[in-house]
């Protein structure tokens, strides 16, 4: 079975509502390829290794969280960017990319999918004013020590998390936002939660966490953002009866 590029593009835009976000990149079809799509390959980032593997399995379209054309990057098409684009265009492969809209989808987004895997229950958005918040505030289904929560992260995500705080402290309330959301730590402190979970950490995060007494976990930008594209890829597969596979190119941060 198959779907057209336009059908998939409209379905994704209807689902993910890119117009509700002020993002750092264009969301939707970033690179146009063939019109008819039988096989879609999802992945976290459109890096060269991912593109090559997807072409090896004869993908007609790629669906990623981190695509191209980020605000502030050089506008010329040289070097790494040329090679990536050449592989896509030379093989007539479409690239669909959704950044913040994929983090924030209330059921299939990165935060929602991560919450399902970690048994976190959302009670309110981290960004109350947003139409769709990129982060969540809530609680653990089963309160546990920071050490036990760290072990759980490692088990579920296959990534050894960095914890700033006290291992024996019991966590029952938590805020979370996948990826590089360490700058949201101050908002999490304002919500008065026991812990904040994201992907990355900065030097100043350590001091804020220590001085505000919040348990901070950096569980990997890539590791925390693997699930949204997989969920949406599966939806496309069901909706249009096309093939979908997720290809992971592991990243150590
Ligand atoms: Zn990200």
Image (spheres, rainbow, N blue to C red):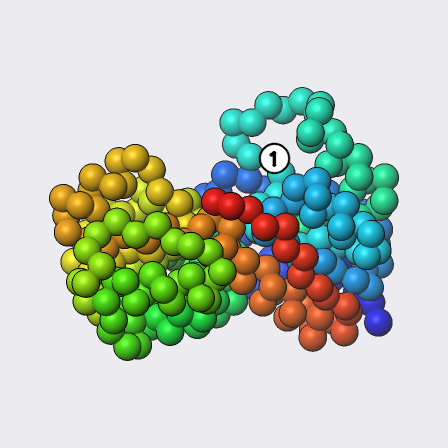
61, above or below 230, in the image = above
88, above or below 113, in the image = above
133, above or below 152, in the image = above
Which residue occupies the foreground of this view, 147 or 129? 147
Q: Which residue is depicted at the point 82% across and 52% down?
A: 56
Q: Which residue is depicted at the point 72% across and 66% down?
A: 244
User: Can residue 86 be seen in the rendering of this structure?
Assistant: yes
Q: Secondary structure at mark 1?
A: loop
Which residue occupies the foreground of this view, 42 or 76? 42
Which residue occupies the foreground of this view, 33 or 208? 208
Q: Is residue 165 left or right of residue 244?
A: left
Which residue occupies the foreground of this view, 234 or 170? 170
User: Can residue 126 be seen in the rendering of this structure?
Assistant: no
**Quadrant of image for the N terminus:** bottom right
Residue 65, horizontal then vertical, whole percent: 57, 51
Residue 92, horizontal then vertical, whole percent: 84, 46
Q: Is residue 152 left or right of residue 83?
A: left
Residue 161, horizontal then vertical, whole percent: 38, 53
**Mark 1 residue crowding within 10 angstroms, few (<14) / some (14–19) / many (20+):** some
* Residue at image mark 1: 69
């Amino acid at each position: 079975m198959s779907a057209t590029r336009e059908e998939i593009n409209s379905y994704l835009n209807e689902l993910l509502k890119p117009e509700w976000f002020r993002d750092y990149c264009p969301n939707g079809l970033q690179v146009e390829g063939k019109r008819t799509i039988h096989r879609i390959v999802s992945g976290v980032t459109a890096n060269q290794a991912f593109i090559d593997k997807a072409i090896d399995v004869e993908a007609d379209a790629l669906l990623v969280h981190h695509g191209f054309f980020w605000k502030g990057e050089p506008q010329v098409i040289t070097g790494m960017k040329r090679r990536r684009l050449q592989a896509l265009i030379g093989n007539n492969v479409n690239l669909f990319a959704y950044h913040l809209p994929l983090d924030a989808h209330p059921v299939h987004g990165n935060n929602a999918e991560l919450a399902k895997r970690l048994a976190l229950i959302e009670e309110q958005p981290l960004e109350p004013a947003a139409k769709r918040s990129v982060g969540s505030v809530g609680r653990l289904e089963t309160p546990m020590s920071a050490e036990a929560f760290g072990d759980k992260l490692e088990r579920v995500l296959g990534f050894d998390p960095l914890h700033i705080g006290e291992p024996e402290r019991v966590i029952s309330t938590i805020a979370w936002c996948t990826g590089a959301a360490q700058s949201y730590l101050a908002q999490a402190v304002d919500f008065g939660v026991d812990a904040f979970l994201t992907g990355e950490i900065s030097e100043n995060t350590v001091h804020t966490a220590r001085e505000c007494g919040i348990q901070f976990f950096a569980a990997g930008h890539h590791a925390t953002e693997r699930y949204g594209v997989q969920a949406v890829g599966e939806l496309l597969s069901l909706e249009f009866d096309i093939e979908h596979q997720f290809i992971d190119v592991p990243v150590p941060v």
